[in-house]
Amino acid sequence: MPAAKKLGQQTVFFQNPPAIIASGAVVGSKEAEGPLGKTFDRVIDDPYHGEKSWERAERRLLEDAVQIALQKANLSPQQVDFFLAGDLENQTEASALAARDLGMPYLGLYGACSTFYEGITVGAVLIDGGFAERVVVAVSSHCCTAEKQFRFPTEQGVQRPLTQSWTVTGAGAVVLAAGGSGPVVTHATIGKAIDLGQGDPSNFGAAMAPAATDTIVRHLLDTGRGPKEYDLVVTGDLGIIGRDLAEELLKDHGFDLADRFTDCGILIYDPQKQDTHAGGSGCACSAVVTAGYILQQIQAGKLQRVLGVGTGALLNADSPKQGETIPGIGHAAVIERR
Amino acid sequence: MPAAKKLGQQTVFFQNPPAIIASGAVVGSKEAEGPLGKTFDRVIDDPYHGEKSWERAERRLLEDAVQIALQKANLSPQQVDFFLAGDLENQTEASALAARDLGMPYLGLYGACSTFYEGITVGAVLIDGGFAERVVVAVSSHCCTAEKQFRFPTEQGVQRPLTQSWTVTGAGAVVLAAGGSGPVVTHATIGKAIDLGQGDPSNFGAAMAPAATDTIVRHLLDTGRGPKEYDLVVTGDLGIIGRDLAEELLKDHGFDLADRFTDCGILIYDPQKQDTHAGGSGCACSAVVTAGYILQQIQAGKLQRVLGVGTGALLNADSPKQGETIPGIGHAAVIERR
């Protein structure tokens, strides 16, 4: 007997779709200088955010995004049932310390850069399942904490290959609620960890494209929908290389998404002017683009129904050195205008 | 309006309590030599488990535990809706690679050593909410991967202070299902990240005791139950020091748990004979004790209702060096004989 709110193999749907009643998007100066600069709530020019370490700065970005979202919703942390968060720091430390500071009951998530969409999924499950009225989902990333942790000491300024993406400095948060106005989350597709043998930690796009493809294909098959039923299919941080690979792989599966398919890592920077190579990445990439631009487009009526697909590269600093290849994962959620 | 399946501030309950239809507990030789040695499903004597690195060994332990649980339930991975897992390796790499190998749709969780109970909570939410029929929850830890990652190179053999715990080498898995026989999960209490300013990474018990206390107190207040309604309240890995601190803190809150209060980290080793100092710790500590001993005691009718409280210390290797203190967290679930 299949579960009552499950479609096909990996997709769940929400009988009373939770609403995104508020969002907060905080970014650094590089993100503010990009094409979406005017869509963010707050810009922090100082990469240290007035703190003594990049890690503390990242935590403050995360807390800022949550506070902005809560203020817009006119809620205090005490009025929130659960706080779902994650980030790229080892042991998701930015989220843990933010959870301590904010004081909300906390479920820590880790889906690499897919964590925002994983959080939207689990948050919507909690609300539609009747376990919560209001959930805050938030993630962060910081180019300086990510670089030192996954690759080289940041100060070393190692030359970046053209396949590499630029980790977004920022944080995104949404308040999901059982009632209230705002775009709603109607479905979520939980991805598999897919690994086609790409082992280069400077090319996450190639590592994640098969997983993004798998999740999009699975979503369409599970729901019986065609790509044209979406105004936009937007992946998290495949970047230019990964997005093109995914487009090819999707065609192999018989789905031509054409110009309705883009990626948050492509939208957020101007690669020519900003020297960002393959595009943007990081937990915050899909989070700030979704919490800013995409929700604004939906609220303005320019987009009716969006399939957002958070994408993550499931590696740590040591795993490629120990000979592991890099599994990718994609978690998808349907966000639509009500 | 409070959520339909929420009690008080932090507790959810399950209208159709999911059953733990099978479990798997795999441990290393040190755990097998302890007082619970006969309660585990499989013992791996070689810390490398035939692999070239401790990290690969840990991943295999995790996969072994899942396979054992699935075999007992007579299920293939394809018959499982979702796989919920986490571990202590940076970016929860053991879980990510196990998810890849096992092929089940994957939600990565991180609650440090509380992850097993976090997983039971999210798994039960998915099932009781109608989103899944069967969920596998699994976690792992390995003394050699944890030591090198959080403290010192393992080979260095640094002398351990008496406040330090011993990370359990092992993995625990459970299959949660909407139907079937086995102990059921009736409630879960999602914890807050609590930090009373303990910053010593060699004394996790002291760091976690306030969080464990907070969750237990919250659970009792939310449910209106007294400690006597539980045959056992068992924390995850407070160890000897943390358990005694929590007992004192609970008395300050007016709850005397007396001899019905113990800790998986106390149960798993003989501190005198095994030189384990403060007791056992690690994601696998609460997982293998719950998946083995506790479920067996419930099934044998020796325990009717247990409050299990996974406990986690939310630090990484750098956070104490950057001047951060260590927040703790406790996630609780009620497991009872049906």
Image (cartoon, coloured by chain):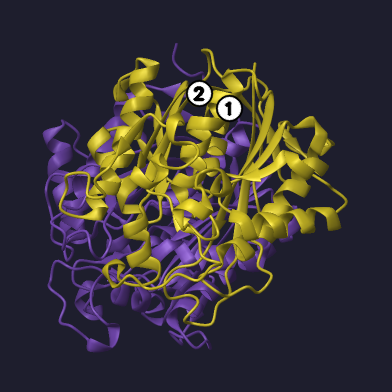
Chain colours: A yellow, B purple
For disc 1, the chain is: A
Q: Tell me if residue A109 can be seen.
A: no
Residue density around tag 2, few if under 14, some if 14–19, many if 20 or more, within 10 Å: many
The amino acid beneath tag 1 is Gly
Q: Tell me if residue A228 can be seen.
A: yes
Please give the name of the residue rendered at 66% of the width and 74% of the height, measured from the top-left corner: A197
Q: Position of residue A269 (x, y in %)?
A: 50, 47
Judged from this view, the residue extending furthest toward the right is: A254
Q: Position of residue B336 (x, y in %)?
A: 49, 41
| Callout 2 secondary element | loop
Quadrant showing the N terminus of chain A: top right
Work out whether residue B37 or residue A69 is closer to the camera in this orientation and state it.
A69
In contact (CB < 8 Å): disc 1 and disc 2: yes
Residue density around tag 1, few if under 14, some if 14–19, many if 20 or more, within 10 Å: many
Give the vertical position of A267 relative to B34 (above or below). above
Work out whether residue B280 or residue B4 is closer to the camera in this orientation and state it.
B4
The amino acid beneath tag 2 is Lys
Q: Position of residue B126 (x, y in %)?
A: 59, 38
The answer to which quarter of the image holds residue B258 is top left
For disc 2, the chain is: B
Work out whether residue A79 or residue A90 is closer to the camera in this orientation and state it.
A90
Work out whether residue A248 or residue A333 is closer to the camera in this orientation and state it.
A248
The residue wearing badge 1 is A129
| A209 relative to A93 in the view: left or right | right
The answer to which quarter of the image holds residue B338 is top right
Measure the alpha-carbon separation of dots 1 and 2: 8 Å
Count of marks overlaid on the render: 2
Give the vertical position of B145 relative to A243 (above or below). below
The residue wearing badge 2 is B5
| A25 relative to B185 in the view: left or right | left
Give the vertical position of A64 relative to A194 (above or below). above
